[in-house]
Structure formats: C-alpha cells, structure tokens
Amino acid sequence: MDYSDRVVKAAITSYFTLFQSRWQYLYYLFGCLGNGYEWTENGDIAAHDGRDMTVPTRNSFDDFSDQYQKMMDMNSPPPVEEIAAVSFLNTQMAEFYRLHIDYIASTMSCVHLTPFVPSPTFEAAKNFYLGQYGLLSTAMVLKTTTPWTIDPKWKRPILETIFSVKGVIFRSNANYNCADFDVNNPDHWFDVKEFERYQTLAKMPHVLFPEEVENDRKRAEIVAKVIGKLKEEMQSKKES
C-alpha cells in the first residue's frame, strides 16, 4: 500500500460510519471546505492538529455493530427481532471491512464490491464542486501564482478524484442521444452548468501536474495506433 492507501485506510478505520470507500474519503479530503486539512509549503497535506494521517484515531469497526441499537435507545424501540437482524447485518458488514480493508482503501472501483461498498453518486460529486474544490481549489491558486509543487505522493489520489468526479458528471448529464457526441460541445449536454464544471475539472490535471500534458499526448498516440491497427485488421477480414 502506498501513502494515500494508508491515509484512506486510517480514515475508514477511524470513521467507518462516515467513510465506507476510498472515493468517499478523497471527495471529503479534496472537496470539502473546512475539513481540518491544509497544504504545506512543501506541497504536502497536513491535519490542523498535527496528527499522523496514516494512523487511525480509533477502531470504529468495534462499535459499528451496535450503532443501530444506540439509535433505538434514543427513539421508540422496534421489535426485538428487527434489532437482532440489523445488529447481525451490521456485525457482518464490519467483519467484511476488516477482512478487505486494504483492498477497499486502495481502489476507487466499487463495482466488484457492490452492494457492500457504495459507488460514487451525482449528489456526492455535486457537493464536491459546489464546495469550490476545497484543497484542489487552493492547489490551483497556489500552482498558478507561486513556484509551488505538490508532493508526488498526492498525485495519484488527486488524479483519481478528478477523473471520478468528471465521470459522475458526464454520466449524469451527457446527452447520449447525440449521434456524434462531443464532450467539448455544450449543446450536447443536458445542463450547460455541468458542462462548464466538467471543463474546469478537465483542466486541473495539466495545471497541477504539467508533466501530464506530455503524458496525455503519448497516451493519445498509443490509443490512435491501437485503433488504427484494429481498423486495418477489420478491413483485412472484410476483404478476405
């Protein structure tokens, strides 16, 4: 596990009722204003209280199984059978996370763990960019106004977060009825505001990590070659 994996693992372990996935914590870390984190002069991220972000503050799995019971104590209790059933389910969920926490903390993909691990939602993405990006917004300002560089250990989680939010916005707003959809054409989107936010996010990787401009060019060349090769093979099969 790399540094960001350990940070996410510590967050899920400490606050399991808030974070059940990597994307949930990264959305919170990079997009939530006033979350208790800030950039340092050397491009690192530090907690306001100075704690080690890779060390859990507590083991929330231990008390997760009785969260439902605690809520019921504050309200009119349901039938005993319902309490027992939900408590059992919560216990099993906590055990599932104990067994798979390393994998859950290190991957943005929730597909293979659904329904246990939640997938990104448009509402979560909307909260992300309506918060003006939090740490990412600050990073954009620092990057464009000062000779400041982000610590390399944060590159992967930042790019993962940007691509994840972009994907959620796209899937929720792109007009798939267009015969030739153009992601850069606002007329092909259901909501122009979402198009503008998508474009803002699209610019972030190249601003925050200038080396990505060249990397993206190389990736585009490779993709073009692969597509060209596939077209040649398909044409050859048709002719034969």
Image (cartoon, rainbow, N blue to C red):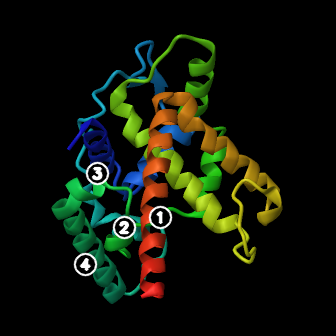
| Count of numbered circles in the view | 4
Give the side of residue 12 with respect to residue 124, left or right: left
Give the side of residue 190 with respect to residue 96, left or right: right
Q: Which label sits on residue 106?
A: 3
- Amino acid at pointer 1: Ile
Nearest the eye: 16 or 227: 227
Image height check: is 200 above or below 229? above
Local secondary structure at mark 4: helix
Residue highlighted by disc 1: 227
Residue highlighted by disc 2: 117
Q: Examine the image and state in which quarter residue 51 appears.
A: top left
Q: Which label sits on residue 88?
A: 4
Q: Examine the image and state in which quarter residue 8 appears.
A: top left
Local secondary structure at mark 3: helix
Circle nearer the N terminus (4, 2) = 4
The N terminus: image quadrant: top left
Nearest the eye: 169 or 32: 169
